[in-house]
Structures are given as C-alpha cells and as structure tokens.
C-alpha cells in the first residue's frame, strides 16, 4: 500500500540512489529521518510549521518522514471502537465524522495558506474525497464490531491504524501541493511484527529485507511513513505500543543507514523532569543511548521502551527537537563518551501503580520467596516495574500496575498457598496508588552521595518511601512513594540534583516594621544570594492579623502590599492549612516577625510537619520552662532548625556566642549588658539633656520601640531577653523570678493608651531630668542594664534588670545611639570579658538578623 504523490523529482532520478540498488551518479547524502508526533500535527498552524521544517531540510538530501495520528485522533478512534462494541452505531459514526472533519479542516486550511503564500492556484489535491474514501473501511469495520458487540485487541489495532494512515496521506498531499514531491508509504508494507496486538515485537530481519526491496521504488525526495503500525506475516495489522511512532522512526533509520533521526515534539528536548510538574525543568543537551534506555525503562513518556535498540545497533544518533522552537538545539542522543559531570540528571515519575508486599513470619533460608513471587506474577501476565527484596529474602515488594492488583494477589496466593495455610506468611500487603519515582544519570556511579541526597531530599519534605531499588547499571535509583506525593517528590529531587542553588521557601508572619523590612531585604538580595551563595529565597506566604496570602510559586515582592488592601485579591486559609501546604515545599521555613502570644504551639506544629522555624519573637522562649524544653526537644526530634538570634540582640551574635562558649566547655561566671538598643538609645539621649518623653517619641518614630513603647520602658522586654540567655545556660528560671525595675514609674507604664502614656510621661519629665542631672554631676552615666549571675547567692541564679548608674570606665558607656552590648565573663575570659557590641534595635538590623538566621538554616542543609 504505497502510492506516489504528484510532483517532479527535483533531484533527477532516484534520490535514494546508492540506497536502492541504483548506482549513484554522484556522492549521495545519507538520508535523514524526521518524525512528527500528534501534537505537532494537531492544528493548522502546527501542521503548516511541520511542512516548513520538512521543506527546509529537502535541499540537503532525501528525507524519510514518520508521522503519528493528528492531535487526539487515536483517543477518538479508541472511543469509537468502544461505542461500537456497546452497540452505539450512531455514536461511533459521530466520532469517525469528527476524525474526518479534523483531518479535512487541517488539510484545507493549510492548503489555502500554501496558495496564498505561493500565489499558485493550479490543480489542488482533493483532500476531502481522499479522507472520505480512506475512512470507508473504518466505518465498515466499526459496523462489524457493533454487530458482534465485541472489540478484540486485534480489532482495536486495526481501528487505531487509520489515524496514522490518515495523517501520512494528508501530509504527503500537502507537501506535493507545496512543490515538494512526496510519497505516502504505509509502514505495514515493510514493518513485520509478531501477533502481540497492542504491543507487537518487530521481526527485524524480515522488516529489513522488505524495506530493502521497497525503497528502490521511492522516486520522490520525501517519503511519508505511517508510524506506530506494523503487520504480521499473514497480513494482520498490529501496533507497537505507546510512542510506537518513535520506534518506527528508529527502525527506519537503521534500515536506511540514516545520518540522524530527528524526533519533533512539543518540548525542546529531553527535559530534566516533566515540565508539567517542575516549572524549572530544562532540556539536556546530550545523553547516551544507555541513559535514554534507562529513562524508557522507567516510563519516560518521551521514549518507546525499544526506541533505542535500532540506534544502538546502527550507531545512528537521535535528536529530540521542538516543532514550535526549531532553532533550539534540542537533545542529542548518541553513543559517544562524555566527560564526568557533563550532564544533569533526569527525574521520572510513573503513576497509577501499586506496591504489593509479601513477608515471611520467620527467617527461612530454604524458601526462595522472591523467586516464587516473581514467577507467580509473570505467570499471571502482571508487569513488574520494580522489585525490592530484604537482605535475607524474608520479604519481597513489587511495583505493579494498579489495575493488576487483584490478579497479582490471586496469583501469589495460589503460588504460596501451602505457606499461607501453615501461617508462615503475613497477609499480602497492598499500597495503592503509588508512583515509581526514579533518578537517572549516566554518571550515577561517580556520584557517591547520590543515594543520600536522593532519600535525604525526600525525607526533608516528609515523603514516605515504600520500597527502594538501585540497578546494577548504576544509572538509576528508584523508589515507590504515595501517589499524592508525586509532584512534591519530583520537584524536590529535581531541585536537589539539577541546581547549584538551594531553594528555601519562606512563610512570613507579620508585616510590621521588621516583617516589611525583611521582605524588602529579601527582594534586594535574592539575586545576589542565588549567584554568590547558591541560595534561592522564595517568599511563598505572608500573614498579617486579619489576612493571609499564600502562593507556592512565590509571592511577588514588588507589590506584596497590594495583597493587603481592601481591594487586594486575598485568600485567608487557616494557619494550619498554610503549614500543611508549606511543608510540601523544599526547605520550608516559618519566619515569625510578630510579638504574639501562644506561638510556641504554632512552632511545635510547624516543627512536627518538618518545617524549620526562624523567629524574632521572644515570647515562645519565655513560656514556662517545661513548655520551652518541649519546644527545643521537638526541633531536635524532627531534625529541624529553630533559630532565634534576634530575640536578644537584633542582628548581634549574642545567642550564638553564648552557645559556642557553652558547647566548647567554658563556664560562664557573669553576663552583663545593655540588651535593649531602645533603652540604650533613651539613656544616651537623656544624658545629653533630651527630655525622656521627647527621646521616646523620637525612638518610636525611628522604629526603635515596640508598637506600644510602654513595653520597652517597663523593662519586661529586657527581662525576657535576660530570661532567654539565662535559660541558654540551663537555668530553669521563670520570668516572675527576675528582679525588674522599669525606666519610668509603674503607674505611667500602666496607662493603656499610647496617647495617655505620653501625656503622663511628659508630666514626669522634670523629675526624671533632675535625676539624670544628679548622675551627671557625680561623673557617672545612666544605663539600663542586665546582670545575670548563674551561681548567685546560695548557688541559685540571680537576674536583675533595671536602670543602673555606672562609672565612666564601664563598657556600657561606650554605647552610642541605639547600640547594645553584652559582656561574658567566663573561666577563659575572666580577666577581660568577651564583649559583643553594635546596633541592637531598629527594623532594618533586626530584619537583617532574621535573614541571617534563614541563611544559616539553608547553609546548614548544604553542609556549609
């Protein structure tokens, strides 16, 4: 069934000279094979693009073009067969009409475009009658199916063959209309297969001989072949299975001795992951035959399982290219050597599977459990995608199609009936649905940390692994995971292996002074951090008192305030719902920039979900000692970071310094310092003669104070910081046990409104100014200090917070503006205390400290 479309052989004689037994008059360029998938042919625009791509290649020598069915034609034909088998003649006829309409409409619209562009309107190919005539046998076939109410696999193969036959016919007619002589070739005339309908095996030797005999008759520079279909020796139509047209193309390339096979599809090459799941997936420039074969064995949608074999046998390279981006280089697949680390890795996910598990109740060296289970599955015709066996063979797990679970269970039960009767085996376990997740790379054997990174990345986001396997080829690692985790797992593993950067996903609580400054700093630094430090910060959520926005793709930081206007588009999920979504992202971090009570329970919930916590909120650290210890234990138990450096000294490394002293075995004798940049600033200002109320108003305007400045002057905030440090020494102190003296009288601080507070503070200015004057006259300086004595009287820790008059030589007198300082007197630093000093208040420095804590979490995960 081969016909030649009208046209003149532009090459003169047979363009396949030297390949078809005719002595060449000149050196002949080896033919090339181009294959176009259904998505490349499904619309007039794409079909026109295909013709342009073919036309561009014609001058370089003979072409063999392989085509799939147009668009969704194959699905439509299957539907028509199903309808017919149920006796729905009219429904089947409507589907055939739809198939005819699509092919006719695409062909006629492209034909009109050709005529407009060339200005030639001569004899037109009769697309409509050709399509109508081609589908007559299909209509008769479906009528027979309807009468018998039976749709066999053999019949379905014949029904589906009309999709490729229709597509190849239309393409050859359009090429000829464009002035490119082309011949339609039904691949059934040369591709010989066995009778395994739906997934036939090719008889290569017979196919090669038929192809050799046929090509002598190809007198046009382009031949258009049907993909996907073949024929048994006795003339019955077969199909080659999913992506069978690719297999047709590589078989044809081998038989013709082609220089290259180009597979044209809707992606720009073999991608590092499914672009539908991973937005950052990108095409691989080059890969080996064996790597592609490994991908095919794990269900990569781009490859037929047997596509690579003809190429490996012949050495013909293959290139995957994008029909709509023809200038993109695509992916070259060949047998050449690659330098170590040249290529990235691919992540594949095969879905709609189940995991069956068979276990012995006691160890038995005599019973070959794995062998018998696999034999049972094989005898039942169950495909096994992966197996995993315990070290001593006492358990075996197999990943199988989800639809085959019951058949597999029955087969295994029959095979092991005696062992089940004796109680030697646990009941067969089934986990469904599952996904087979695989990491494939040619250089896997050189990546000694690959298994650790693979499973560590999955564990970090809470993906449970049901079974694992690593092939002897060392090109892949696979595991079975719950189907619900597919997208998360693919994205996580892809990020772990294909990017130099570590993606960190942030949920920011609070949009006040510190929160808004943090968002501004992230926006400013994100490009630098990714480029210089390999950390990609992505703010996926922002929560305020009444509203929450969450977008796993990332919140646009340039306009985040718009989300919180009355007209802003908002969603307000509960915090639990947000945490559930956050935990599904790589390196999730909850960032608390609030001063809310009760956040210790929120932190515990986040840590339990595998979310890191970075906090500028002191209150969770000042809850009763037992609650604080439970929080710390949760972080350790779940192997998650809980960082809170900014709770004491804004961006100053106060807590980290103290922790290092304790971890290295030093004994802390005394901690003294000005822990509040705000109160330090106020003390500096009043020592200059500024009234206390005016100094507080300035500090509030500059963002140095809490929203209610009463909290600062009360000393309670400083007391919390003192408590945090004392507890870092292991002292089970309560906030009530700290001696606190406020900077202003208690009755002023107790004023509930900010306006009333300032009014009373102004009334107190004269008395406070007089006190400061006396201190100044004595040559001393007023400071608001903390003193922590871990030993204290009678061995009990003592902590005092309050205004203190110090000598001019005291370290705190060097403080300027809103600076803070802390002095650690230890056994190693007994003569000269270890002092940490710097800016200790303000939204910018606190936000910088929070950002630094976030980066410490990320760098800790990267081993830096």
Image (cartoon, rainbow, N blue to C red):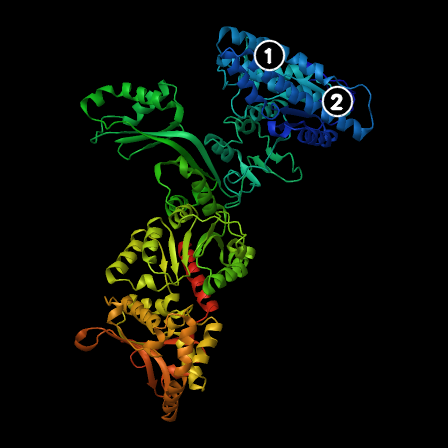
Residue at left offset 28%, top offset 21%: 413
Residue marked by disc 1: 138
Could you tell me if residue 825 is visible in this image?
no
Residue at left offset 43%, top offset 73%: 755
Horizontal relation, residue 309 to residue 19: left or right: left
Residue 686 appears in which quarter of the rendering?
Answer: bottom left
Q: Quadrant of the C terminus?
A: bottom left
Q: Quadrant of the N terminus?
A: top right
Q: Residue furthest bottom?
A: 777
Horizontal relation, residue 171 to residue 729: left or right: right
| Residue 355 image offset from top left, x and y in percent | 35, 30
| Residue 183 image offset from top left, x and y in percent | 70, 19
For label 1, the SS is: helix
Q: Residues within 10 Å of mark 1 (few under 14, many from 20)?
A: many
Q: Which mark is residue 297?
A: none
**777 vs 24, nearest the viewer:** 777
CA distance for labels 2 and 1: 26 Å
Horizontal relation, residue 571 to residue 328: left or right: left
**252 vs 301, nearest the viewer:** 301
Residue 756 appears in which quarter of the rendering?
Answer: bottom left
Q: Which mark is residue 176?
A: 2
| Residue 429 image offset from top left, x and y in percent | 29, 29
Above or below residue 303? Residue 688 is below
Q: Residue furthest left?
A: 794
Could you tell me if residue 522 is visible in this image?
yes
**403 vs 230, nearest the viewer:** 403
Residue at left offset 29%, top offset 79%: 830
- Total marks shown come to 2
The residue mark sitting in front, 2 or 1, is 1
Above or below residue 693? Residue 197 is above
């Amino acid at each position: 069934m081969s016909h030649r479309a009208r046209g003149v052989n532009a090459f003169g004689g047979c363009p396949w000279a030297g390949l078809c037994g005719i002595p060449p008059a000149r050196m002949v360029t080896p033919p090339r094979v181009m294959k176009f998938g259904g998505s490349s042919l499904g619309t007039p625009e794409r079909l026109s693009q295909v013709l342009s791509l073919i036309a561009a290649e014609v001058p370089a020598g003979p072409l063999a073009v392989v085509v799939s069915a147009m668009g969704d034609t194959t699905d439509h034909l299957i539907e028509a067969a199903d309808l017919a088998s149920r006796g729905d003649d009219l429904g089947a006829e409507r589907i055939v009409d739809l198939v005819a309409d699509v092919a006719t409409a695409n062909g006629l619209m492209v034909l009109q475009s050709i005529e407009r562009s060339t200005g030639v309107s001569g004899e037109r190919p009769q697309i409509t009658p050709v399509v109508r005539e081609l589908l007559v046998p299909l209509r008769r076939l479906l009528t027979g199916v309807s009468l018998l109410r039976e749709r066999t696999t053999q019949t379905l193969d014949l029904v589906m063959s009309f999709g490729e036959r229709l597509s190849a016919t239309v393409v050859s007619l359009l090429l000829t209309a464009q002035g490119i002589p082309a011949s339609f070739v039904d691949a059934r005339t040369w591709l010989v297969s066995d009778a395994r309908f739906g997934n036939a095996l090719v008889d290569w030797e017979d196919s090669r001989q038929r192809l050799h005999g046929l090509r002598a008759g190809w007198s046009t520079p382009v031949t258009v072949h049907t993909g996907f279909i073949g024929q048994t020796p006795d003339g019955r139509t077969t199909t080659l299975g999913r992506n069978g047209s690719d297999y047709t193309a590589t078989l044809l390339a081998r038989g013709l001795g082609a220089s290259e096979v180009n597979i044209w599809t809707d992606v720009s090459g073999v991608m590092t992951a499914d672009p539908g799941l991973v937005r950052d997936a990108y095409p691989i420039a080059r890969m080996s035959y064996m790597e592609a074969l490994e991908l095919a064995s794990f269900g990569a949608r781009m490859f037929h399982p047997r596509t690579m074999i003809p190429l490996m046998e012949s050495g013909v390279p293959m290139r995957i290219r994008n029909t709509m981006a023809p200038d993109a280089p695509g992916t070259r697949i060949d047998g050449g050597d690659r330098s170590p680390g040249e290529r990235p890795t691919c992540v594949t996910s095969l879905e709609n599977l189940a995991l069956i598990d068979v276990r012995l109740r006691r160890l038995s060296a005599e019973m070959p459990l794995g062998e018998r289970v696999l034999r049972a599955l094989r005898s039942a015709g169950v495909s096994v995608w992966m197996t995993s066996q315990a070290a001593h063979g006492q358990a075996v797990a197999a990943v199988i199609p989800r639809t085959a679970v019951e058949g597999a269970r029955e087969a295994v039960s029959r095979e092991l009936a005696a062992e089940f009767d004796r109680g030697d085996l646990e009941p067969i376990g089934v986990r469904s649905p599952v996904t087979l997740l695989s990491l494939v790379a040619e250089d896997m054997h050189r990546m000694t940390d690959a298994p650790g990174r693979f499973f560590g990345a999955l564990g970090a986001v809470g993906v449970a692994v049901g079974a694992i396997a690593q092939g002897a080829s060392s090109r892949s690692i696979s595991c079975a995971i719950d189907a619900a985790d597919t997208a998360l797992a693919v994205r996580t593993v892809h990020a772990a292996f294909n990017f130099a950067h570590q993606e960190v996903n942030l949920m920011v609580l609070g949009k006040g002074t510190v929160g808004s400054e943090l968002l501004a700093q992230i926006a400013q630094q994100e490009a630098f951090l990714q480029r210089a430090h390999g950390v990609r910060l992505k703010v996926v959520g922002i929560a305020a008192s009444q509203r929450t926005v969450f977008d796993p793709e990332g919140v646009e930081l340039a306009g985040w305030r718009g989300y919180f206007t009355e007209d802003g588009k908002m969603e307000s999920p509960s915090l639990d719902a947000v945490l559930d979504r956050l935990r599904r992202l790589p390196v999730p971090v909850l960032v608390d920039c609030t001063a809310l009570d009760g956040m210790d329970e929120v932190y515990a919930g986040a840590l339990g979900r595998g979310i890191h916590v970075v906090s500028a909120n002191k209150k969770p650290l000042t809850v009763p000692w037992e609650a604080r210890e439970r929080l710390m234990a949760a972080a350790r138990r779940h192997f998650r970071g809980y960082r809170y450096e900014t709770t004491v000294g804004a961006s100053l490394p106060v807590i980290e310094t103290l922790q290092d002293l304790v971890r290295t075995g030093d004994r802390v004798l005394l901690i003294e310092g000005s822990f509040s940049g705000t109160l330090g600033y106020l003390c500096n200002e009043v020592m200059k003669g500024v009234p206390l109320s005016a100094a507080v108003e300035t500090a509030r305007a500059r963002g140095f104070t809490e929203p209610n400045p009463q909290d600062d002057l009360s000393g309670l905030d400083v007391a919390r910081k003192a408590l945090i440090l004392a507890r870092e020494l292991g002292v089970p102190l309560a906030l009530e046990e700290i001696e606190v003296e406020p900077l202003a009288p208690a009755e002023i601080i107790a004023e509930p409104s900010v306006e009333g507070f300032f009014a009373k503070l102004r009334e107190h200015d004269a008395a406070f100014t007089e006190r400061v004057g006396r201190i100044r006259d004595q040559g001393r300086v007023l400071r608001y200090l903390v003193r922590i004595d871990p030993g204290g009287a009678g061995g009990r820790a003592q902590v005092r917070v309050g205004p203190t008059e110090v000598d001019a030589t005291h370290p705190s007198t060097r403080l300027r503006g809103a600076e803070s300082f802390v002095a650690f007197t230890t056994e190693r630093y007994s003569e000269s205390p270890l002092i940490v000093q710097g800016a200790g208040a303000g939204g910018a420095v606190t936000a910088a400290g929070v950002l630094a804590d976030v980066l410490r979490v990320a760098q800790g995960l990267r081993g830096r």
